[in-house]
Image (cartoon, rainbow, N blue to C red):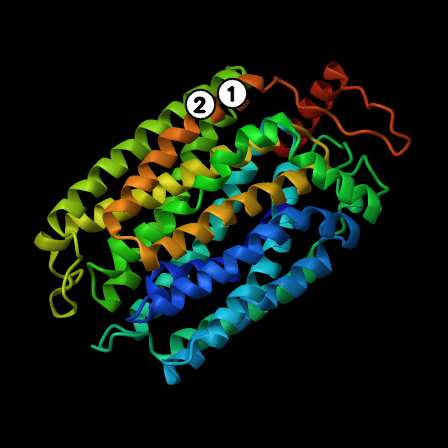
Amino acid sequence: MTQVVLVGFVCFLCPGMFNAVNGLGAGGQMDATAGNNANTALYSTFVVFGVLGGAVVNLCGVRYTIFCSGFMYALYSASYLFLNHHPSNASFTIAAGALLGVGAGILWAAQGMIMVSYPREDEKAKYIAVFWIIFNLGGMLGGILPFAINYNTTQTQNADGVYIGFVVLECIGACLGLALAPPNKVTRSDGSSVVLVKYTNVGREGIEIVKLFLNPMMLGLLPMCFTSNFFYTYQFNHLNASLFNMRTRGFNNIFYWGFQMLGAYAISLLLDAKRLSRRRRGFIAFSIVFVFFNALWGGTLGVYLKHPAGLPEADRMDFKESKRASGYIILYLLCGIGDALYQSLAYWIIGALTNDNQKLSRYAGFYKGMQSFGAAIAWQLDVKVIPRNQLIANWVLIVGSAPFMLYVIWSIKDHSEEAKAADGSEIEYDEKAVAAATTAADASHAA
């Protein structure tokens, strides 16, 4: 658990602050063009390095990959500080976005491996929830910062102090990566080793990456991966930025990311419920997520029909206008809950496929890479496609990914595939031995 908490705080300070910047809509600027193009560049490189990230982590380890990747987040935030003073020159911001895609792909592959391979099988959803709660505390803090600094200002872009604060916090987060332990020194709460496969090389990793695109489970998850960040663009730019003034955008993000913690905790109780088979838990969780998202997009459609072009800058809502703004703010925070439900289910499905930490680093990288492929398209669509068509695309993707998710959930077994030993032999799953060890571990924690 300690390692998951540590990586949670790394993501609290690095991706959490990035989420805060993006959640403001347009990166905290009035004109969304630079932010959209920077995010397109970011997610374009993220596609490649998300898929390659698992191999990089397996070859180089988690500590220094996370340490180096974290500084890419600081560079990205610094580029918006530059943009504040040179609004006509977005080249630095776009380049920083492309570099961040490299770092983020590697960081999230390492994070995914730690989060879903370190816990016992019956604790995976709990570990996902713990990570998601800590991670989204970063988004909350990132919402408080611009809300407080911009509280008494009427300017239409973030003050310099907001971006400086983000840069400092992200540098601290990068350094925190050095506190992580190598996987070969980590044991689970039942005494089992996290690392069962100890040897890899560049050639093997290259082959394993190719095999990801031939794996029926990964192909089944591809629509889910593609969809999982696609909706951010519409939510941030057309629910938050186009309807609310600057300080209220920060206020909204406090609750958007805060309610993600509630969503992650709630679904973890279901996904770790031992009285149900894993397949049944997956089907119930999927049903909840599917119904919730369709209700969200129904509400979003209602907002669009009322404000198809958003609101004029001078008429954008303030959080103090409770009668006018409360319904829109509630819809936005419900979007945060929906995101947490979706991401938690996605990671749980991936973690249910295997306990092999090297495979899981590749699976997590594949998830983030394909997720970024969808995000890159979504951010560029915002430049070229009217909001109505973006809303339709989001809704269609949610519905269209459902059959493929159901196929993968149907394939889940009550016990994950185990890792192979260094000599390639299968490591047998001794259910009685693990159960006894688990009971002893639980008793020692209770004591």
Query: Horizontal placement of 173 versus 201: left or right?
Result: left
Q: Find disc 1 in the rendering and name its residue.
A: 407
Q: Residues within 10 Å of mark 1 (few under 14, many from 20)?
A: some
Rendered position, 156 above or below 204: below
Amino acid under disc 1 = Tyr
Q: Between 87 and 415, which is closer to the camera in this rendering? A: 87
Q: Which secondary structure, mark 2?
A: helix
Give above or below for 418 relative to 205.
above
Left or right of 312: which side holds 420? Answer: right
Residue plotted at (51% across, 49% down): 372
Asked if the residue under mark 2 is in contact with the one under mark 1, i.e. CB atoms within 8 Å, the reply is yes
Residue 145 % position (x, y): 37, 68
Residue type beneath disc 2: Pro
- Would residue 228 be visible to someone looking at this image? yes
| Residue 247 shown left or right of residue 117 in the figure | left
Which of the image's four quarters has the N terminus? top right
Tell me the tag on residue 403: 2
- Of the 4 image quadrants, the one containing the C terminus is top right
- Residue positioned 31% across, 27% down in the render: 291
Residue located at (35% from left, 41% from top): 337
Q: Residue furthest front?
A: 384
Q: Dot 2, how many residues are within 10 Å of its Cα: few (below 14), some (14-19), or many (20+)?
A: few
Residue furthest out toward the left: 323
Dot 1: element: helix
Q: CA distance from mark 1 to mark 2?
A: 6 Å
Number of dots carrying numbers: 2
Q: Residue 412 falls in which quadrant of the image?
A: top right
Identify the image quadrant of residue 137: bottom left
What percent of the width, then of the height, locates residue 379?
40, 55
